[in-house]
Image: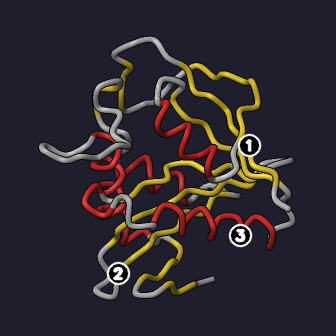
Amino acid sequence: MQQAHEVFTISPVAASDIPAVTQLINSAYKGEAGSKSWTSEGHLVEGERTTEVGLLELINRPGITMFKCCDMQSVVLGCVLLEKRETTLYLGMLSVLPGMQTGGIGSRLIQYSETFAREHQYNSITITVIDKREELVAWYRRKGFVPTGSLIPFSNKSSAALFSFSLMEMKKILV
């Protein structure tokens, strides 16, 4: 399934894309020096968000598909991981290159994820967001996600929390 938006294409991540996608995710989550990346969690988490080995393991798991958003030169500008769960589609690792944020790529990837969910008979999408990230929670609220009241302890193999926080579960019901 591939979809074009203006000068962008969205398609599944292949094993050959893993180095570029790993770099994109780590740069988006960590923030780059001097960048105005509002999605950075570098002040909350140390270490890498993911590794090439970890991503390769993820995309090879049944029920998981990762999509990349590329420009016409095939540069990976954004990505999203979708996991088919029993009652909902889980959306994770939504990442956009820091210099391309606020350009609508994240919104396009969410729209694409909603289409994917409907095509696979899901009526909701669930995400988790660091509860201390008020600006990110607000962005997801504007996209139609609402907190479920569920908090999940933070855990990541390749990084460690600098402060105490939880992951807030949010859900969007698709109409």
Q: Amino acid at mark 2?
A: Asp
Q: Is residue 7 above or below residue 136?
A: below
Residue at position x 45%, y 87% from top?
Answer: 6
Q: Is residue 133 above or below residue 72?
A: above
Q: Which label number is shown at residue 116?
A: 3
Q: Secondary structure at mark 1?
A: strand
Q: Secondary structure at mark 2?
A: loop
Query: Percent from the top left, x then y, of residue 166?
Result: 55, 20
Residue at position x 60%, y 37% from top?
Answer: 128
Residue 107 falls left or right of residue 82: left
Check disc 1: other Cα within 10 Å, few if <14, some if 14-19, many if 20+.
Answer: many
Q: Amino acid at mark 3?
A: Phe
Decide which of tag 2 and tag 3 comes sooner along the chain. Answer: 2
User: Residue farthest to the top?
Assistant: 164
Check disc 2: other Cα within 10 Å, few if <14, some if 14-19, many if 20+.
Answer: some
Q: Which label number is shown at residue 71?
A: 2
Residue at position x 80%, y 68% from top?
Answer: 118
Dividing the picture into quadrants, the one containing residue 119 is bottom right
Q: Amino acid at mark 1?
A: Lys
Front-lying residue, 8 or 89: 8
Q: Do the residues bearing badges 1 and 2 touch, measured as CB atoms within 8 Å?
A: no
Alpha-carbon span between mark 1 and mark 2? 29 Å
Q: Which residue is mark 1?
A: 171
Dividing the picture into quadrants, the one containing residue 8 is bottom left
Alpha-carbon span between mark 1 and mark 3? 16 Å
Query: Percent from the top left, x then y, of residue 31?
Result: 25, 43
Q: Do the residues bearing badges 2 and 3 touch, measured as CB atoms within 8 Å?
A: no
